[in-house]
Amino acid sequence: MEQVELKISLKDWLYIGVIGAFFGLLFSLFFYFLNEKFQDISTIFFGTFTAICITFFSSLFISVSNSYILPQVNKRFWYGISFGFSFLSGALGFLFSFSLFYTFDVYITNYIDPYSWYLTFIIGSLTFLVGLILHQFISMKYKNEQSKTEILQSKIKTLENELNPHFLFNALNSMCELVYIDQEKAETSLLNLSKFLRNAISKESVISIEDELSMVQTYVDIENIRFDNNIHLTITMQNTKKIQIPKFSIQLLVENAIKHGYQSKKLDIDINTTNDKISVNNDGKKIEKIQLGTGLSNLKNRLKLLNIGTLEYDEKNKNNVQFTIQLGEKL
């Protein structure tokens, strides 16, 4: 069985602390009504405070072991170390609480003082069992999240694979006629295609905006061989150094502009990037009603799966057709 490191979030610890205090309260109430000797408010305070102390020591030990101990030892010893800390969490949590209440001569400590070491062992053993259950719970949670991540990556790769042949066929069609007409242009086109494909086959699903724009420029260079340099690309960048976007995102919008906007004359495509959005507009043929085809639907799905942003478009602008990638809080 694969060993899984305990990784508990702050939210998890909040739940554990509340649940621990609640069960500490119930445990104290049980003793409160079990015997007249324990029918004092200090019994309830002691039990609840002890549960909180155990939670604190658990948090401390797991944080320290995950950061400094477990990374330095073989995984075969992880269970032993983790469960040893589980026992210590209960034992030290009880001893700390008992010592504090005993120092202030709280009523309940007079009756449990003779059994304090027995109780230390018993509570340590109980937290050992709780640690075992918690370890299995976190392991299942970790594996579930890992499975979700793998499924998500598989979906993204499937979407990317739908695009790659599309790019390749378009590029090859653009240069087929050049082989016998203009060998120099054909050679330049093939070199550009090679550069484009080198970036396209990289494993990364998310790349920097600079790399994406470099691919876009290469793509436009390839297309301009077919369109006699009538496609003019203008790029304006503002505060975009840390932006990461899905591969082929801007390229798809530029390709869509060429496919639907070109009218046998010059086509101006403007790309404007800021830290919260990326806009691509062109002055070509006006589309009366925009419909998302395979490529744009693909981009919309990848933006959603990667939790990067949303795809928006403006149908009201009479002069230009504009698509915008509205970046989310993740970036």
Image (tube, rainbow, N blue to C red):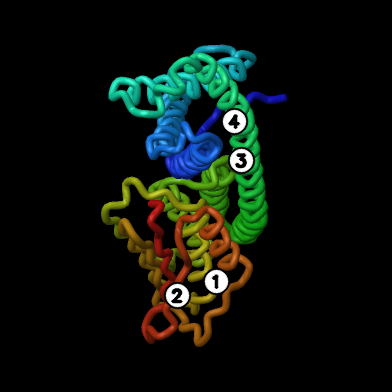
Q: Is residue 176 visible?
A: no
Residue drawn at x 54%, y 29% is 6
> Dot 2: within a 10 Å radius of its alpha carbon, few (fewer than 14), some, or many (20 or more) residues?
some
Residue 316 locus on image (x, y percent): 40, 85
Give residue 259's mark: 1
Return the residue nearer the eye: 70 or 131: 131
Return the residue nearer the eye: 185 or 265: 265
Q: Which is nearer the N-term, disc 1 or disc 4? A: 4
Residue 144 locus on image (x, y percent): 64, 42
Q: Which is nearer the N-term, disc 4 or disc 3? A: 4
Give residue 130's mark: 4
Give residue 38's mark: none
Residue drawn at x 62%, y 27% is 129
Residue drawn at x 52%, y 53% is 306
Q: CA distance from mark 1 to mark 4?
A: 62 Å
Residue named by callout 2: 313
Q: Is residue 69 left or right of residue 154?
A: left
Q: Classify mark 2: helix, strand or loop.
A: strand
Q: CA distance from mark 2 to mark 4?
A: 54 Å
Q: CA distance from mark 3 to mark 1?
A: 46 Å
Q: Which is nearer the N-term, disc 3 or disc 1? A: 3
Residue named by callout 3: 141
> Dot 1: within a 10 Å radius of its alpha carbon, few (fewer than 14), some, or many (20 or more) residues?
few
Above or below for 254 versus 4: below
